[in-house]
Image (cartoon, grey):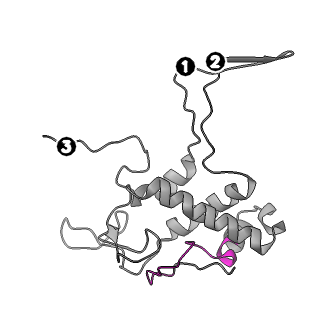
Amino acid sequence: MTLIVETGAADPGAESYASTADADAFLFARGITLWGILATVDKEAALRRATDYMQQVYRDRWYGNRSTRTQGLDWPRWLVPMKDVPGGYGSVPAYYPITCIPNEVKNACILLAFKAAAGDLAPDVQPQVASESVGSISVSYIPGARQTVRYQSIDHLLALLLRDGGSGSIAALLRA
């Protein structure tokens, strides 16, 4: 099945923020050659899984609002401030065009797809190991240690597009 890439048209059937050609060029330019040995069908599946992951993890954290009710993915969006560029009016920032998929979103999708090609991006959380020994090898974890994987490079890449700046640790407080 051919990958349906979101171009900014708010396609209800969109499955990915990046194409295999986008991923090939981006990863090759960074010397990540393992991606090149994958079959196209495997690259497409990894891009779908990466986009699914982004939908699950970042959906409530993006700035702005979805462009339409029927679009398949979270982007394109409107009222997303361009925090790191001059423009706008006075203290009002410039905004991304309503048909824009920022390069940061595409690139994050590609980087996550590379990780997804190697395994599950959101594996089930296992009980926390306090101490384990197998022969002479011993493993123990700090109490309260994080049990889930956090892709810090992706959070940093998307930071300007996320309400919490990519940290994932800030919660909105509401007064009663």
Query: Which one is earlier in the sequence, the residue at label 1 or at label 3?
Result: 1
Residue 75 pos. (x, y %):
43, 71
Query: Which one is earlier in the sequence, the residue at label 1 or at label 2?
Result: 2
Q: Which mark is residue 174?
A: 3
Q: Which mark is residue 56?
A: none
Residue at the disc numbered 2: 130
Distance between the alpha carbons at the discs numbered 1 and 3: 31 Å
Task: Report the side of 138 relative to 176 (left or right).
Answer: right
Q: Quadrant of the C terminus?
A: top left
In front: 44, or 95? 44
Residue 31 pos. (x, y %):
76, 62
Task: Report the side of 52 relative to 31 (left or right).
Answer: left
Question: Which residue is outermost to the left?
Answer: 176
Mark 2 lies on a secondary structure that is loop
Distance between the alpha carbons at the discs numbered 1 and 2: 7 Å
Q: Tag 3: Cα neighbours inside 10 Å, few (<14), some, or many (≥20)?
A: few
The part of the image, by quadrant, that contains residue 130 is top right
Amino acid type indicated by mark 1: Pro
Amino acid type indicated by mark 3: Leu
The residues colored magenta run 7-23
Question: Which residue is outermost to the bottom?
Answer: 9
Query: Which one is earlier in the sequence, the residue at label 3 or at label 2?
Result: 2
Mark 1 lies on a secondary structure that is loop
Task: Report the side of 163 relative to 49 (left or right).
Answer: left
Residue at the disc numbered 1: 143
